[in-house]
Amino acid sequence: MEQLGYIQKQPNLDAVFAALADPTRRTILMQLTKGEASVNQLAAPFEISQPAVSRHLKVLERAGLVERDIDEQRRPARLKAQEMMAAVAWLTEFRAFWDNSFDQLDAVLAQMKQTP
């Protein structure tokens, strides 16, 4: 039931999918599944500069996938999965379509096997 007077923030799926489109950002997100990390730690597996990793983190922050705190002199990044769940929910809506398509393909293949 919708409550009057309340505005529910809708996730920005465009920003989420744009952020996920880059393999470096996906790798950063995978690293953050192990816990928070500094820019230095996130940059270690890449052959790119720390400022480049910071730019990737800003894209992930704008998409709502990462949050950063100020901890003395460093700014550790932490995974924030709520926005990603919205993308998963959106993609899940297509599962019934794909399941139905595969079932139809199975039926066609079974029929082709029976035809001499």
Image (spheres, helix red, strand yellow):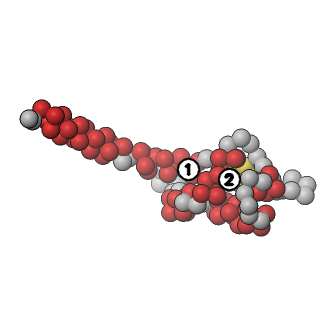
Secondary element type, mark 1:
helix
Task: Give, as a three-letter code, the residue at label 1.
Answer: Met
Q: Any mark on residue 75, and which?
A: none
Does residue 19 appear in the picture of this structure? no
Q: Residue at x 65, y 47 (%)?
A: 30
Is 76 or 103 nearer to us in this picture? 103
Please provide percent x and percent y for residue 63: 60, 60
Say which quarter of the image contains residue 9. Answer: bottom right
Is 15 or 54 nearer to us in this picture? 54
Q: Is residue 83 left or right of residue 53?
A: left
Task: Give, as a three-letter code, the residue at label 2.
Answer: Ile
Screen quadrant of the C terminus = top left
Q: Any mark on residue 28, and which?
A: 2
Q: Residue at x 36, y 43 (%)?
A: 95
Please provide percent x and percent y for residue 48: 74, 64
Q: Residue at x 68, y 63 (%)?
A: 56
Does residue 96 appear in the picture of this structure? yes
In the displayed image of the protein, which residue is found farthest to the left? 116
Residue marked by disc 1: 84
Q: CA distance from mark 1 to mark 2?
A: 14 Å
Secondary element type, mark 2:
helix
Q: Which callout, 1 or 2, points at the residue further toward the start of the chain?
A: 2
Say which quarter of the image contains residue 49. Answer: bottom right
Please provide percent x and percent y for residue 40: 82, 56
Please provide percent x and percent y for residue 39: 79, 57
Please tell me whether residue 95 is drawn above or below residue 7 in the rendered image.
above
In the displayed image of the protein, which residue is found farthest to the top? 114
Please tell me whether residue 103 is drawn above or below residue 78 in the rendered image.
above
Q: Residue at x 54, y 63 (%)?
A: 18
